[in-house]
Image (tube, rainbow, N blue to C red):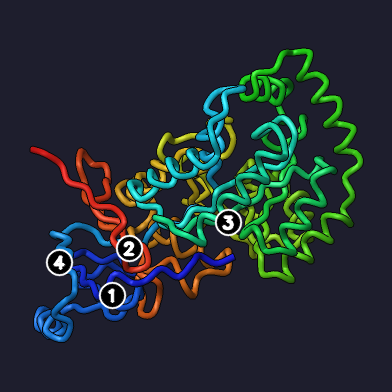
Amino acid sequence: MNDRMIASAGPMMITNGKVVLPEHVAQAAVAIIDGRIAAIIDNEQSVKDWLLQYPSAKVVDAKQQYVLPGLIDIHCDAIEKEVQPRPNTLFPLNMALLEFERKLPVHGITTMYHSLSLGVGLSLRGDHLLTGMVDLINSYRTKRSMIRNRIHLRFEVSYLAGMPIVERYLKERAIDYLSFMDHSPGQGQYREPGSFERYVMKNQGVSIDEVRVIVEDLIVRRQQVDQEQLQKLSEIAQMHGIAIASHDDDSRQKVEESAGLQVSVCEFPINLETARHAVELGLHVCVGAPNVVRGASHDKNLRAVDAIRSGAADILCSDYHPASMLTAVFKLHDEGIAALPAAVRMASLNAAQALGAGSELGSIELGKAADIIIVDRYDDLPWVTHTIVGGQLVYHSAVRY
């Protein structure tokens, strides 16, 4: 489902910026007409000529700050915490969506694939919360928005009762991205004994007796997973142009099984060997920006920077912490792990291409949607001064000195 076409705010020009293009950084101005990038101008006289041609254009002076494409976050489950910040403490879905959305331009995120989990014990408790949020996001984005709100459905494959929901959403194109997850104990993210139980108890506020029931039920259902049913979902997704990801692959064999389901993205591979094999199979590999910022995985799995240095990861996502996206991009640049254009691509163009949106989003190029951010630095950290989505200024900040 596409975002509603919002009337353009009129011509705009961003001047005096260090513009991060797909392959290099240029001192240039960016002209915007009808919500799209109309020109990238690298000489002062041409800037003056364009402004004479469009005297009503809004001029945004970048003041020698960086001008980047808006960030595209393909995996972030933070909206679930906005709904349920503590176990058994629920807030209205519409409040959660509005409050979460307006945080995102602050962090430079202009397209968010809100990651909603369909499964037992690992996410919002109750299918009605999942379906309610999907319906809400789809309705909201046809009426108004600050950013491009999209939906990433994270399907726990052992949740057999969820199969009809996934199939319906795919056929209705009610979601934009699908991932197959397997969080059953003893493999993937929860291969260490007791790690799954500890997570569920903390996340959902259940007792040890309740979590034992969840685990026993999960193990039984995991043995009943039908690969042919997953293959059917994969075929429906492909038919409707919806990209698929695997999640927490922990071996070469697991990646090959995922590739057999026609996934295009391998999310959070557990180790470097698995990540490298995913690349060998032609898959995009997505790692977490918080992992880059902190220098380690919170689950003691693969360090994201090791995968990036090895050429075994090409997409950054915020995972659970949107503020980490832009900070990770500049950390990769500052520490010499990646040139700035390459680091920016990991949080924009590569993600767009992996999900089939690369011709429309993800880079500052002629004809593309004008999703642009202006970024200053303070104490070696990036902070966003302007966020533009579809040619409209949706966020502008200033500070007092």
Q: Are marks 1 and 2 in contact (CB under 8 Å)?
A: yes
Q: Quadrant of residue 264?
A: bottom right
Q: Amino acid at mark 3?
A: Asn
Q: Secondary structure at mark 3?
A: helix
Q: Secondary structure at mark 1?
A: strand
Which numbered marker is on residue 372?
Answer: 2
Q: Secondary structure at mark 4?
A: strand
What's the CA distance linking mark 2 and mark 4? 14 Å
Q: Nearer the viewer, mark 4 or mark 3?
A: 3
Q: Amino acid at mark 1?
A: Ile
Quarter of the picture holding the N terminus: bottom right
Q: Residue at x 58, y 30 (%)?
A: 299
Quarter of the picture holding the C terminus: top left
Q: Residue at x 35, y 79 (%)?
A: 366
Q: Of marks 3 and 1, which one's residue comes earlier in the chain?
A: 1
Left or right relative to 345: residue 216: right
What's the CA distance linking mark 1 and mark 2? 10 Å
- Residue 145 in the image: state x and y as whole percent: 43, 56
Image: 40 above or below 117 = below
What's the CA distance linking mark 4 and mark 3? 38 Å
Image: 335 above or below 242 = above
Q: Nearer the viewer, mark 3 or mark 2?
A: 3
